Amino acid sequence: MKNSLYCVFCRFLTPCCYMLLFLIVLAVIVGIIAAIVLSQVLKPPKIRLHMLGAMPFKGNYISYYDFKTNRVAVIDETLKSNSKMCFVMPLDRSNLRDADTMRRAAGRASHKTSQTQGWEESWQYLPAPMTMNAQQLFNPPIAECEGARWIQLDYVGSNQKNRKCSDCYDFCLPDYGIERDVVRGDELLNIVRRVCFYLFVPEWRTYAQANTIEQNQRDFETYYRNRNHLATAYGSTDVSDTKWIQLQKLPRKNTFQDTVEGVRRGVYGQNRPDLSYQQQNYQNGNGYNGQMQ
């Protein structure tokens, strides 16, 4: 019996088995160190991408690309509970022609471990609260956005990075597109840019350096006061209500649980002056290649 077991053991010490074991270990390592994992579901004309992110992104994101309505919805999973928000912006059909092209590009990019293009910050967007029922924009409705606040992102053309408001937080959402390899003739899915903007999140105000609650509310209203016309960009005839976040519903004091939650949110979303986002250290071609698996 001992000799039989020894013979069986010897059969597994062949070069072929060594190679198979090496490939298994390599696959496990690649799965662990992958910075971003993308998964896509749904049938045409809608695509759902779920990104598990690492720096320079601060959290996980779910993106819906609806080629029928030409809209993109992005869910930042950092924003949960009563501060859950869904962002909507136009779909760039000049880069993404159709759902099938996007799926094929995603398949070709599945073997990529780094990207040398894209990922740059784009601060040319302004957020505006939507007063219309944005769930009606998508059919079927997006489950992750049920009961959420909808924020419309509008392209303004000019750099908004220096336009800040008191107690606002910086957000950068992934914007997918097709990267063309002119040498190989391939089309690969990539994050062509990071859509960045500042947003007032009232539930987080007690965890940031700021003035009084009343002052922050006035700052928020001032920030959006002259942007009422933006709510009509998707066909709504209503104007934006600058008091879309009611002051009386905001937290007035901290509990220990709130403090712990605030620390967690600070790690993933807060733009603190003493820990300035450091995005400049992760620019494309400056020490960071975005990974896509």
Image (cartoon, helix red, strand yellow):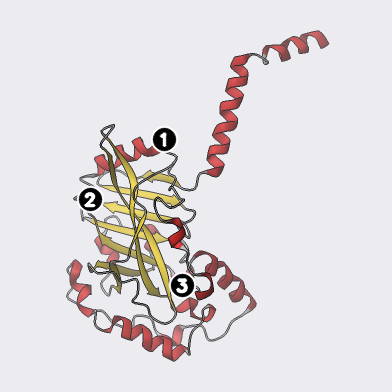
Residue kind at label 1, given as amino acid type: His
Q: Nearer the viewer, mark 2 or mark 3?
A: 2
- Give the Cα separation between the discs numbered 3 and 1: 38 Å
Task: Identify the residue at horizontal 28%, vertical 66% (top origin).
Answer: 124
- Give the Cα separation between the discs numbered 2 and 3: 30 Å
| Mark 1 closeness class: few <14, some 14–19, many ≥20 residues within 10 Å | few
Q: Left or right: 276 with respect to 150?
A: right
Question: Upstream in the sequence, badge 3 or badge 1?
Answer: 3
Return the residue at label 1: 111
The percent coordinates of residue 179 (x first, y second) are 29, 44
Query: In the figure, 73 relative to 85: above or below?
Result: above
Return the residue at label 2: 67
Question: Upstream in the sequence, badge 2 or badge 1?
Answer: 2
Residue kind at label 2, given as amino acid type: Phe
- Give the Cα separation between the discs numbered 2 and 1: 25 Å
Return the residue at label 3: 82
